[in-house]
Image (cartoon, rainbow, N blue to C red):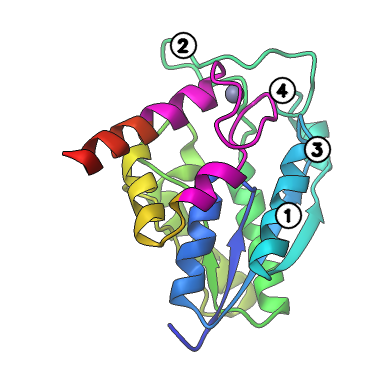
Amino acid sequence: MKNEKAVVVFSGGQDSTTCLFWALKEFKEVEAVTFDYNQRHRTEIDCAKDIAAELGIKHHILDMGLLNQLAPNALTRNEIEVKDGEDGELPSTFVPGRNLLFLSFAGVLARQVNAKHIVTGVCETDFSGYPDCRDVFIKSLNVTLNLSMDENFVIHTPLMWLNKAETWKLADELDALEFVRTKTLTCYNGIIADGCGICPACKLRKKGLDEFLEGAES
Ligand SMILES: [Zn+2]
């Protein structure tokens, strides 16, 4: 894959930044695409921009503001509180079909920039009710994208079977642990690096990091 080109779906968060480093190792040329859907915090877009600039990666930002019309929820409307899903309910951050839309647009972009590979940080291990994060969905969409454009795209999901601690381990193996730890944004309250420490995203991130650090010591 060394001589080929990849487009990485990139949000500026821990997972997609780790995927960006993975892609930089695997492919000759890498471009990133970020979807702007009026996220709760503009910091998210700025954070993605800064990371792409620092790594010298061509960065596409696509306007997906229509998601705001389709899914009035906690990620896009400030007045709704972010909550964990309870009793099997979807979390309030859920945008139905978001990955379907994002990956389809990433496919169109990949075709335009002559990239054969599409990389996404979706993960089934921490499956929180998002059906379009499942491996079976990604494989299905890969076939659909290829049929729709008569292409031979390969969708890569380096994090699909990793838990949060293993994702930190992967960042470490890619010599990107400090970078990911200090420059990425996962926090629902828009605070880079270790974040606010109390939102569900921060708790999940810290739990994984602690597990990885404990495992690395022993
Ligand atoms: Zn937070």
Name the mark nearer the viewer: 4 or 3: 3
- Residue 83 vertical placement versus 216 (above, below): above
Marks 4 and 3, how far apart in space? Answer: 16 Å
Residue 154 visible in this rendered orientation of the protein: no
How far apart, in angstroms, are the residues tagged by discs 3 and 1? Answer: 12 Å
Image coordinates for residue 80, horizontal then vertical, percent: 73, 14
Residue assigned mark 2: 86
Which residues fall within the magenta stretch? Answer: 178-207
Question: Residue 133, percent across and down?
Answer: 47, 44
| Residue found at x 50% / y 63% | 21
Q: Eyeballing the image, is 194 above or below 86?
A: below
Q: Quadrant of ligand 1?
A: top right
Q: CA distance from mark 4 to mark 2?
A: 16 Å
- Type of amino acid at the residue the image marks with label 3: Arg
Q: Earlier in the sequence, mark 4 or mark 2?
A: 4
- How dense is the environment of label 1, judged by Cα within 10 Å: few (below 14), some, or many (20 and up)? some
Name the element at disc 4.
loop
- Residue 203 lies, in percent from the top left, at 47, 22
Reading the chain from its start, which is encountered first: label 2 or label 3?
Answer: 3
Q: Is residue 209 left or right of residue 13?
A: left
Q: Is residue 69 left or right of residue 103?
A: right
| Location of mark 1 (residue) | 50
Dot 4 alpha-carbon crowd within 10 angstroms: few under 14, some 14 to 19, many 20 or more:
many
Amino acid type shown at disc 2: Glu
Label disc, if present, on residue 42 of the rendered structure: 3
Residue at x 71% of width, y 69% of height: 109
Specify the amino acid type for callout 1. Answer: Asp
Quarter of the picture containing the C terminus is top left
How far is disc 2 from disc 3 in space, using C-alphas? 28 Å
For marks 2 and 3, give the one nearer the viewer. Answer: 3
